[in-house]
Amino acid sequence: MSAPLRVVTASRRVETEAGAPARLSDQVRQLQAEAKRLAGEHIEILRANLLQTEQIADEIARGGDAYPPGVRDLARRLHEDSVAKAQLIQGIMARV
């Protein structure tokens, strides 16, 4: 899992590499960069889960008479949707 976000209050001073207190705008940029990195990790987890769903759905869709026909059909459609959505997410993230 990803690391939790930190809360920075006005009373907390962040220091720069030189040891001087960082400006509030620098803190905001740092937190925004961290949030963006964590969002990217979260999106990658979603994509990985979609790929896992695709694999399981394909197994069920091809499972034959052990699975009810309605479930097999739903799994087949879920398999197709999961593949498409994972590829769409990957394409969007490649442009970012």
Image (tube, rainbow, N blue to C red):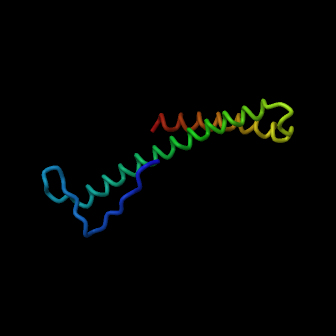
Q: Is residue 18 left or right of residue 25?
A: left
Task: Measuring from the top left, give residue 68's x and y in whole percent.
Answer: 86, 40
Task: Measuring from the top left, give residue 24's x and y in whole percent.
Answer: 25, 61
Q: Is residue 3 left or right of residue 76?
A: left
**Residue depicted at 25% across the width and 66% down the height:** 12
In front: 63, or 89?
A: 63
**Residue depicted at 53% across the width and 35% down the height:** 90
Q: Which quadrant of the view contains residue 83?
A: top right
Tally the marks.
0
**Residue depicted at 56% across the width and 38% down the height:** 48
Q: In the displayed image of the protein, which residue is found farthest to the front?
A: 66
Task: Measuring from the top left, give residue 86's x and y in whole percent.
Answer: 59, 36
Q: Is residue 56 left or right of residue 38?
A: right
Say above or below: 54 vs 20: above
Q: Which quadrant of the view contains residue 14?
A: bottom left
Q: Is residue 1 left or right of residue 19?
A: right
Q: Quadrant of the C terminus?
A: top left
Task: Measuring from the top left, give residue 62's x and y in whole percent.
Answer: 78, 29
